[in-house]
Image (cartoon, rainbow, N blue to C red):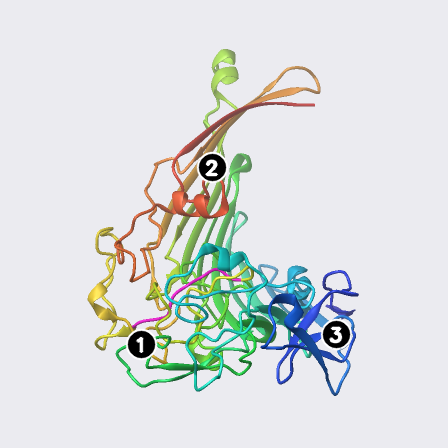
Amino acid sequence: LNFGVRYEYPSSAAEIREHATNFVPGYGPVIVGTNRIVDIDPTLKGPASLISRTAPFTLPLSGVHSDKNNIAPMLGFAYAPRDAGTVLRGGFRMAYDDLFNNVPASMALSAPYNLQTSQTANVTQPGKFPWAIGFDQNVPLISNFGKQGPGTPTTGVLTFQGIDPDLRSAYMYQYNFGIQRRLGPAISVEADYQGSSGRNLGVFIDVNQPSVIVRDPTKRGTAAPNEQLFPYNHFGKAQIAKSIGNSNYNGLVTTLRYQGWRGTYVQASYTYGKSLDYNSSYFGSANFPGETGAPVDSTNLRLEHGPSAFDIRHRFSLVYVAELPMIAWNNVFARAALDGWRISGVTTLQSGYPFTVVTGGPDSSGFNQANAGTMTMPSAGDRPDLTRPGPVPQNNRNPDAAFDTTFFAAAFAGRVGTSGRNQYYGPGLANYDVAIGKSFPVGEQVRLQLRGDFFNVFNHTNFANPVNDMSNANFGKITQTLGSAVATSVGTTGGPIGGPRLIQLSMRIQF
């Protein structure tokens, strides 16, 4: 029986001592360590238009209030009844996560010490405007293009990244229970339940998301006569990291092991699991289509609840090591040439990853969350409506029509479509890695090993997820293999598991 308690202080970037501004909901941008609220004089331009007001509080120098109650208990047990062939195991732990350095560091990129301006066609500028405007800081920081009313500006052009002053440390409950049974001197079986629950997970929320007055539901929310109303109309997008996300995983793992003659080892396992969350990454992930990390409607987080971007429902894995040939050779030359070879490998079969269908193109809802990629988040599109009830027909074996695209239609003006997050699954994976090698004695303490590794030995084609963007001409089609898609997104050429066949030959001296 093992029991422990750990006390953790939250960890973050180096303490921000100056030149940083946090965006405090209800007040706006506040310089850290002070009670000064940053505002804009609409009669001036550029840095000269920045002014300050007094807040009824002083913001901590770190920009957030400390979280000092992170106690992490853990408990584990293993019990073997008198029947020596059975073992029961279980455990529970609570663990905390550190905060990414670039989350608090993003406060140093905000006004008044840095100006990040966002000029948007049909929002802060007419439909077409010169490139120079996007790089000119000596411009009005409050746009008068597209007025909400007489003399009322639509929005500001300064963008902010900040942290909820009451941000809490993310933590997780992890628990498991299993039973292992020996069936003989060389075989054992095991069944384990594994679960976890994440709390206070980080989600970026745009606290300056506009509401939309819908006067023409057939048009986008940003297009006249529809109007956007901003909570802080002196500023643009204000992405604040909040600890409001949750996650949940439950899985059953069954395992069969054999360890027998001449070092032969075989392990086969099957996992059936399900992972749900509100976002699968603080900053989103280019590896998973539509997974931006930020909600499409910051005022309705429930729309984000769905399968995790890494949710794999079924996974089978086979690991083996065997000596070849398993024959007692009588001839000394045959024994030297043919004995001592070892074959090993890993076989992986699993179901596909989920994906989200997005409309792409211009912002259709008017919430300013679609195609709003920033340094903290990749861009994405709004979600479409489902045109009829029932599951969307899918055929991942047909790259030209992986799913029925007629089930989707763009949703407009002031709302998010009915097609949910990560509701569709792409092709599965079948991968076979094999290695074969032989070790030769070169002296009393030196051996020479020859080895060949064959990754995806059968060169089985594993398809990537289909194109999920309705504005793409290939919408609904599979245009990449898993290897090329992931290798491109992470900037590698070797390819991940499931990529094309790779053969690696090596020679190693052991001494």
Q: Residue at label 2? A: 494
**Camera-side residue: 428 or 372?**
372
Residue 405: x and y in percent read 23, 64
Magenta stretch, main secondary structure, is loop
Give the residue at mark 1: 412
Number of residues whose C-alpha sits closer than 10 Å to that of mark 2, classed few (under 14), some (14–19) or many (20 or more): few
**Which badge, 2 or 3, comes first in the chain's sequence?**
3
Task: Locate residue 381 relative to residue 67 in the image: left or right.
Answer: left
Q: Nearer the viewer, residue 51 or 395?
A: 51
Q: Which residue is mark 3?
A: 71
Give coordinates of residue 392: x percent, y percent: 25, 68
Labels 1, 2: front one: 1
Q: Amino acid at mark 2?
A: Gly
In this rendering, position of residue 280 left or right of residue 241:
left
- Residue drawn where x is 62% and y is 63% of the image: 115
Q: Residue at x 38, y 47 (%)?
A: 482
Q: Does residue 442 lie above or below 261 as drawn?
A: above
What is the three-letter code of the residue carrying label 1?
Answer: Phe
Specify start and end residues of the magenta stretch as a single range. Answer: 377-384
Q: CB atoms at circles 2 and 3 under 8 Å apart?
A: no
Asked if residue 58 can be seen in this view, the reply is yes
Compared with residue 451, is residue 245 higher up or lower down, i.e. above or below?
below
Mark yes or no: residue 170 visible: no
| Quadrant (top left, top right, bottom left, bottom right) of the C terminus | top right
Residue count near mark 3 (Cα–Cα under 10 Å), binned few <14, some 14–19, many ≥20:
few
- Magenta region includes residue 216: no
> x%, y% of residue 443?
68, 15
Q: Is 381 covered by the magenta stretch?
A: yes
Q: Secondary structure at mark 1?
A: loop
